[in-house]
Image: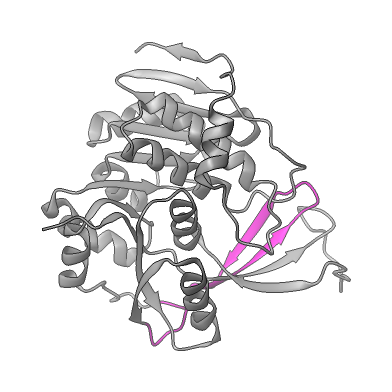
Amino acid sequence: MSRNTDVLVLGGAGVDTIVHVPELPLPYADSYLIHDGIRTRAGQTGDFMSLGLTALGLRTHHLDFLGDDPEGDLVRALHRERGIALTAIPQPAGTKRAVNLVGPDGRRLSLYDSSRGRPDDRLPEDTVRDLAARSRHVHVSITQPCAHALPTLRETGVTISTDLHDWDGENPYHEPFALAADIVFVSAARLTDPESTLRSVAERGRARAVVATAGAEGAHLLADGELTHVPPVTPPAPVVDSNGAGDAFAAAFLFGFLNGEPPLRCARYGAIAGAHACTVPSTRVDAIDREELLRRAAEPDPSVTVTSP
């Protein structure tokens, strides 16, 4: 069967309402005036991944549940306008949504509406199997329906990546994703010992590369038994919002991976894309394109630190 899709993205479709607040944490008050406005736009983790991959020239297909509601219409319109293939499974509970409080320094606090799903939600196995068989790679969001799709994905033999987001290294919910993926991304925000967590994932699972992103401190890459500190990249413009930076990192890393680049080069791509994402206002959905990524990647690399096992 022809693999006419580069990356199949599972899950993570939804809508965010963006509220710029004067500070985070937000002190209690009866009310606040939001001078920048309160805006709702399509774009959660799977949407951002799909957008980032497409901007880099990768053929991308997104599969998830969507409701027959205004939020679902926004998600469908985003994919249609950006030329991203979308298979939407009907979701009677409605399209996933969240509220993002964004501080002046670009940090965010996300409030997710967990009512937009049901415990027995399952992505159709035949659809998952067929789309995966036509894809070079699958990126899996850490939603409950995607967890149930992991065995089917493994049967197809396709390589898998996942983003564990702010995992603490202990919550058992994340483990099936961490141990089934060939490439694992995680935020270092809640990891007390990033190296120990990365090595544990690699030793217990099948990951050939494990990456802990650390914002302005760069990232930690474990590949071939070596832990490497990936230096941060100076953003090309003022930092306005960190929303989507992790997805941008992952998309650019996968761009390198699918083009046969070594892990450190892939991580360098990720750092460049993540820095770019931090300059994009949260009310917009945008991603670095292939030409800009390669231009910036051609600039001299900063020094890296390698730690042997």
Horizontally, residue 298 falls left or right of residue 237, namely left
Q: Is residue 269 magenta?
A: no
Q: How is the image coloured?
A: one colour
Whether residue 146 is visible: yes
Q: Position of residue 102 (x, y in %)?
A: 73, 57
The C terminus: image quadrant: top left
Task: Name the residue rendered at 30%, 62% in the picture.
Answer: 146
Horizontally, residue 145 falls left or right of residue 278, namely left
Horizontally, residue 237 falls left or right of residue 297, namely right
Q: Position of residue 167 (x, y in %)?
A: 46, 45
Q: Position of residue 297 (x, y in %)?
A: 54, 29
Task: Name the residue rendered at 46%, 48% in the picture.
Answer: 56
Q: How many marks?
A: 0
The N terminus: image quadrant: bottom left
Task: Choose top left, top right, bottom left or bottom right for residue 19.
Answer: bottom right
Task: Name the residue rendered at 15%, 57% in the picture.
Answer: 2
Q: Is residue 155 above or below residue 14?
A: above
Q: Is residue 105 magenta?
A: yes
For the residue pair 293 and 44, the one nearer the viewer reads as 293
Whether residue 193 is visible: no
Range of residues picked out in magenta? 91-117
Q: Position of residue 173 (x, y in %)?
A: 35, 53
Horizontally, residue 188 falls left or right of residue 152, namely right
Task: Name the residue rendered at 51%, 83% in the picture.
Answer: 73
